[in-house]
Amino acid sequence: MRLSSLLIIFMTFFAAAVVSLVAANFSVKLIEETSEIGVRDALDDEGMTWAEVEADGLQVTLAGIAPTEAVRFKALTTAGSIVDAARVIDEMEVEAQAAIAPPRFSAEVLRNDSGISIIGLIPTSTDRENAIQRFGTLTGGANVADLLEQANYPSPEGWEEAFSFAIIAISQLPNAKASIEAGRVSIIANAGSAEEKAAMENKLNRSVPPSVQLVLDIAAPRPVITPFTLRFKKDAKGAQFDACSADTEGARIRILAAAKRAGVEGTIRCTVGLGVPSPTWSQAVEQSIDAINNLGGGSVTFADADITLLALPGIDQTLFDRVIGELESGLPEVFALRAKLPKVEDPNEGPASFTATLSPEGQVQLRGRVSDAGLRELADSYAKARFGSDKVYTATRIAENLPNNWTPRVLTGLEALAALNNGTVTVTPDSLSVVGDTGNPDASTEIASLLAGKLGEGADFDIEVAYIKQLDPILGLPTPEECEAQIGDILASGKINFEPGSATIDASALDIMDQISVLLKKCGDIPLEIQGYTDSQGREAMNQALSQSRAESVLNELRARRVLTGTFTAKGYGEERPIADNSTEEGREANRRIEFKLIRSETGETTLETTDQSGDTDSETIQEGASDEQN
């Protein structure tokens, strides 16, 4: 009886425990589902559908890959607003971010009378100390402001070439700014004259590496034009300027537009300068060119405010009167017009003339008529003073009935001839013509100013001067490839020989060195490597040393002849790269040689070579003391 009571009590407690366990489990499931659903709905409302929610009892675990750290934190905050934040377990990850892009490397170098300053961001791989040292050399070791910063990133393509070229450019320009980017250098500088500007641009363009884009902005002062001259003509050959001057860029554009309307083709050179007689210059020029076009041809010459217009012979008088009347009434007040309609000349009538001819070799011939013996002697003396006493041949004759102004016209013609490289000046009682070639792009303008100033108002003259680039002392320089070819022509007719077993150039080769020196002075700063080679006889080390000394001897000979060798190097290659069989005397002689090679950044270099005939093997001991200095 007692056992049965105990059993009943035990079973009661057991049943109560089972009921409690079932109730607790149901409660946990309910809490898990409620928490999970609530958190998931809240995250979906915020657009964070990437988040995965899993409830485990009272704990809520968030998983998934958040796009950013901020979004991840927002997901935790959203979940914490639904359940206790302490119950939220963070197992989320953040999407990997892209690597930080390298910075944009750039630098600016400014050089003036106060020194050099350089500022910017450069890669750590750039030799900063060497750059500062080179700048210090330009300023005498002082006044170099180093404001550079460095970043540990790889150098972008073209950076090192651009940085090195900028240093070279700044060394050539005493007042300039160079802006450096990868593969690009922009230079702003001032020049003292148009010629100096052209020389600067030519030198920089010749030395820039192929991988670098060079942008130049070199300013030169505007020239003073006295008298302020313009000459335009139109005839059966077409329309052209003998001289063109403008006071502003806007005026130049207006003048060229009028010339285009009148039939001028191609590129037109018009100098923007100082000395204009009136701000209405372009208006007067434009009206005058239109008048020549309306007449069908003729010429108009401006000398300051004086205008001389010559129509073509045979033009209708009524048309001439109408066009000239309109021009006179429309010109600004400051300008004075003198118009002339020449008579049709008899082709069988031979007018008196004086002719001076300048040949390409510099020889001058004076022919035709002079007014008296004094003019003949004066013209002969003047020509000899301008062209050389041994280069003038005079064959003039004295004639009567020549104009009173014949003497100044003849001397003015000779002065105009001196502005040409070759050509002819013809003086007649009514006109003066200058025909020829020149290397000065402004020669036509200068001659027109000379004739307008010396011949007086209303003078008729004609200028047909052609600009030949090859005659230009600045722009006519040969290209590096042309220099290479011309050196080859020189070496094809001679050899550079050395004394046996030494690096001393034989006397028989000095003439060849003279010819090469003259050519290289015209070539300017070209990157050139002078290479020395030997045959295979003797010790390899001695052959290499001998070839180095011989290459340096050639370089030193060029320096002794005042050739600028700053871009030249000398290098000995010993018995490397034989061009013939070393088992024969002829082959060994061919292998003992000096080669001239352009240094290019690309492959396909052309080699110029000459053999040396030392008459000895290369195994003999060379004397010490050969300089290894390279410019």
Image (tube, rainbow, N blue to C red):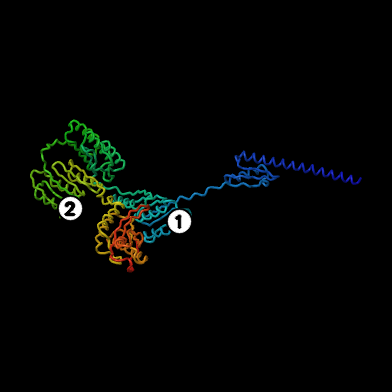
Q: CA distance from mark 2 to mark 1?
A: 59 Å
Provide residue 223's location: percent of width, then percent of height.
Answer: 27, 48
Q: Using the image, tell me which numbered label, if any, was put on residue 557.
A: none
Provide residue 447's location: percent of width, then percent of height.
Answer: 21, 46
Give the crowd class for mark 1: few <14, some 14-19, many >=20 residues within 10 Å. few
Residue 522 sits in quarter = bottom left
Q: Secondary structure at mark 1?
A: loop
Amino acid under disc 1: Ser
Q: Which quarter of the image is occupied by the N terminus? A: top right
Amino acid under disc 2: Phe
Q: Is residue 317 left or right of residue 220?
A: left
Provide residue 213's location: percent of width, then percent of height.
Answer: 38, 49
| Residue 326 in the image: above or below residue 66 | above
Q: Which quarter of the image is occupied by the C terminus? A: bottom left
Farthest residue to the right: give it.
1
Farthest residue to the front: give it.
583
Q: Is residue 58 left or right of residue 230?
A: right
Give the crowd class for mark 2: few <14, some 14-19, many >=20 residues within 10 Å. some
Residue 233 sits in quarter = top left
- Name the residue that disc number 2 marks: 387
The reply to whether residue 298 is in sight is yes
The reply to whether residue 559 is in sight is no
- Name the residue that disc number 1 marks: 125
